[in-house]
Image (cartoon, rainbow, N blue to C red):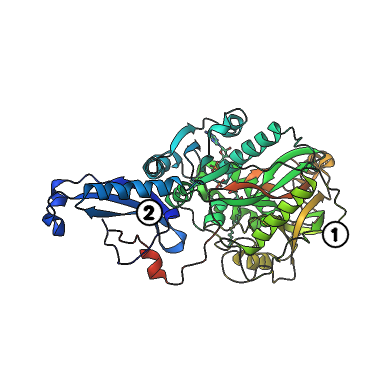
Amino acid sequence: MSPVPENCFVPTSEIIAVEETELNKKQCNTGKWQKMAKPHAFTVYYVKKARNHRWRCSDVTFWCVDEHLCNQWIQALKELLEMQKSRPKQLLVYINPYGGKRQGKRIYEQKVAPLFSLASISTDVVITEHANHAKDNLLEVNINKYDGVVCVGGDGMFSEVMHGLIGRMQKDSGIDQNNPKAPLVQCNIRIGIIPAGSTDCICYSTVGISDPVTSALHIIIGDCQPLDVSSVHHNNTFLKYSVSLLGYGFYGDILKDSEKKRWMGPMRYDYSGFKTFLSHHYYEGTISFQPAKHALGSPRDKDSCRTGCYICKKSEQQLAEQQKECGLKYEEDEEEWKVIKGKFLAINAVNMSCACPRSPKGLSPAAHLADGSADLILVRKCSRFDFLRYLVRHTNQDDQFDFSFVDVHRVKSFQFTSKLSDDNESSVTDIGKKRFGQFCRDHPACCCNIANSTWNCDGETLDSSAIEVRVHCQLMKLFARGIEENCKDEAACSQSSVEQLL
Ligand SMILES: Nc1ncnc2c1ncn2[C@@H]1O[C@H](COP(=O)(O)OP(=O)(O)OP(=O)(O)O)[C@@H](O)[C@H]1O
Ligand SMILES: CCCCCCCCCCCCC/C=C/[C@@H](O)[C@H](CO)NC(C)=O
Ligand SMILES: [Ca+2]
């Protein structure tokens, strides 16, 4: 047992488990316990907060001469834990054995399963055998049996589980997902993410770190973080939901290229990123959007969304009032549309900051997890050098939006149509390929592209370039609490511990 500083506290909500301690002879014969005739002891396992939002399971053992008193303590603490009603007891776990560096199964078995077992959480574990296994399974499984669903994998695996759960909710409520205006039913069963993917952006942006043990502990103590979800449609057909990045141009092209290089693992994004940067293609199209007038913040705010965020709380209240007034009826939205035509290197719509280890502040550092809006970032045609300056700001503290060629808008819905409509695209591409090769040969240096880009929807490609997107405020919930403010006193933070009880 590590040494425990005196007079430290841990909230009962952050106790993982309490167990009677089996004492062996060696333990009894050490230190002051030697003087006790027959010592009794119990161990409290608790969340220890370390630096950079990392959590660990720590423990402290309390000794006592009186067996009855010892049992009373164990009983009282167990009753306190029973009162934590938001903690899950039964979880459904999906593991993608091929995500990221193919470590999902090992990570779960070695780092997560022992913690779930310590916290007396029962699990049904499914190791996926093919893409969409988890999604299809969620459409038929007896979901009421579970207090949450856990996915072990990356953003793509999370996306699968989210589609399964949201789809199941709409199916059970008779909502047609193909109707872009349909008010969707909130999904109250929480999802836990054990990061084992390549980017793990959703985990990083909602917890502050990609670390399997930290995420497992957030699940065990029953944290809850609502999340905005965007629905994506084309011609009254549902395509996908998105919670992190919907990216056209740069991020779409990276994804399309990197899919062919899955064998490279997480490195594929560096390879395709470099290639896409050099190709420097821009795409012409029209973006129309409805500004998020209800949202209190702005993408240029200096403050970021943090645990207990005031702006997200306000949106929760607004949502509750709206649901009280109109229920699930769709209110015709008369709000103005703004229209921007142009040549874009990248169009990025983010529902959250999209922070990840490569970009610790994300693509929109002031975006909120649960404010019912997305930040729409338009990067217009500019020189390679300027685009590089913009990309470098993904990785440092400088303002990414402080460029004449970058615009950012906080929106509740948007539409995009490419100058080449989808219906014309295939024929134009065919003719283009025959006559010119894929890119404009008239102006070899201009980088204009006669084909469309592809939308990157949380790491999955979309088949259509013309899309209609609507943000659904707090449609689902995670086992997370948002990113906590950094501990001012780092030393105290790394030593938080249990008060000596006896
Ligand atoms: N058994 C499986 N075989 C093949 N593909 C699978 C299997 N299980 C899940 N998938 C698919 O693999 C895709 C990628 O998985 P995942 O997101 O876990 O890893 P990643 O792509 O490396 O990480 P990231 O999404 O963070 O970049 C998901 O879209 C999922 O549908
Ligand atoms: C010369 C320096 C250039 C550095 C550029 C680094 C930028 C990295 C930013 C990554 C943002 C990722 C946003 C998240 C997207 C995910 O939804 C998706 C699926 O995991 N990942 C990717 C890479 O598309
Ligand atoms: Ca948001």
Q: Nearer the viewer, residue 67 or 405?
A: 67
Residue tagged by mark 1?
338
- Quarter of the image with the C terminus is bottom left
Q: How many neighbours does mark 2 have within 10 angstroms: few (below 14), some (14-19), or many (20 or more)?
A: many
Where in the figure is residue 410, as x and y percent of width and height?
Answer: 74, 61
**Of the residues under marks 2 and 1, which one precedes in the sequence?**
2
Q: Which residue is mark 2?
A: 46
Amino acid at circle 2: Tyr
Quadrant of ligand 2 in image: bottom right
Distance between the alpha carbons at the discs numbered 2 and 1: 51 Å
**Mark 1 residue CB less than 8 A from any atom of ligand 3:** no
| Residue nearest the viewer, comparing 410 with 466 | 410
Task: Tell me the element at label 2.
Answer: strand
Q: Is residue 451 above or below residue 288?
A: above
The mark tally for this picture is 2
Q: Residue 346, relative to residue 138: is it above or below? A: below
Residue 203 falls left or right of residue 406: left
Q: Is residue 261 visible?
A: no
At 48% across and 47% down in the image, what residue appears? 219
In the image, is 357 to the left or to the right of 313?
left
Q: Nearer the viewer, residue 231 or 488?
A: 488
Q: Position of residue 81 (x, y in %)?
A: 42, 48
